[in-house]
Amino acid sequence: MGFLSVIRRWALRDKMPIREIARRTGLSRNTVKKYLREGAVEPKFKTPSRPSKLDPYADRLSAWLLAQARKSRKDRRTVKLMHEDLVKLGYDGSYERVAAFARAWRADRHRAEQTTGRGTYVPLVFQPGEAFQFDWSEDWGNIAGERVKLQVAHIKLSHSRAFLVRAYPLQTHEMLFDAHWHAFRVFGGVPGRGIYDNMKTAVDRVGRGKQRAINARFKAMASHYVFERFCQTKLA
């Protein structure tokens, strides 16, 4: 859902023209319109009937792009020069295919940086509607005369500090989705970003440093509501 989420955010929040989204993603304008209209289908690229000429060079090109990303802009090689170097190695495909690969690689890297927090930060001052924070806690309640442990969802607007609290029997995705639905209903809209800790309904695996493997169902929810997600240490 990550790619679809980016497309929806560009179109619905950033008001980016369909033509520009198509240029950035390499998809046709009709395909972009289709995915925006359906709204819940991950974009799928057509599988060629034969392997791409670029396949044998994909790892090498990815390594070049990563190396260039770590350099200053003035020291980076252009994609055109990378294409010329691939031709010297035996690649006989088009420059456009290499350029499309580079665009997709950079888009994936940009999304990874957003979700891992690398190169990003969470400000201490927020604009209205900019962000909300979500977290779980545990508490006890008396239901029908029986003491029951409850899982409490806390959703707070980062600017106004307005909040909603709802109690559930478990911390499942269904409870997570319900809490968000009620929060956005009460708040009257969806902020641009959601800030989370490493809760199990959002993060499948915690990697080195700030690397996180984001849960697919959680990504689908973020794509549906069109907000960016940041999973990190919770804020006070």
Image: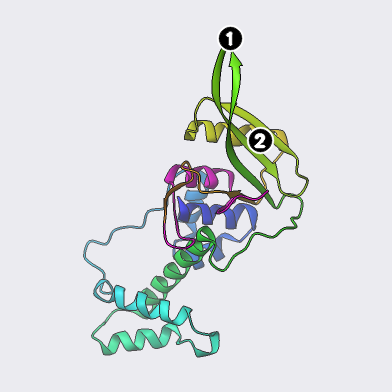
Residue 118 painted magenta? no
Q: Is residue 115 above or below residue 136?
A: below
Q: CA distance from mark 1 to mark 2?
A: 29 Å
Dot 2 alpha-carbon crowd within 10 angstroms: few under 14, some 14 to 19, many 20 or more: many
**Residue 169 percent across, percent down from the top left:** 52, 25
Image point (53%, 56%), residue name: 6
Q: Is 197 on the left-hand or right-hand side of 130?
A: left
The circle on residue 183 is 2
Q: Residue at x 72, y 58 (%)?
A: 124
**Label whose residue precedes the other's in the sequence (1 or 2):** 1
Name above or below for residue 82 compared with residue 18: below
Side of 43 relative to 8 (left or right): left
Q: Amino acid at mark 1?
A: Gly
| Circle 2: residue type | Ala
Find residue 145 and name its label: 1
| Residue 234 x/y as whole percent | 60, 50
Specify the farthest residue to the left.
50
The segment highlighted magenta reads: 207-236
Q: Residue at x 29, y 79 (%)?
A: 93
Give the secondary structure at mark 2.
helix
**Percent of width and height locating residue 117:** 54, 62
Residue 177 vs residue 141, the one in the foreground: 141
Q: Would you call the spot at circle 1 few (<14 residues within 10 Å), some (14-19), or many (20 or more)?
A: few
| Secondary element type, mark 1 | loop
Magenta stretch encompasses residue 231: yes
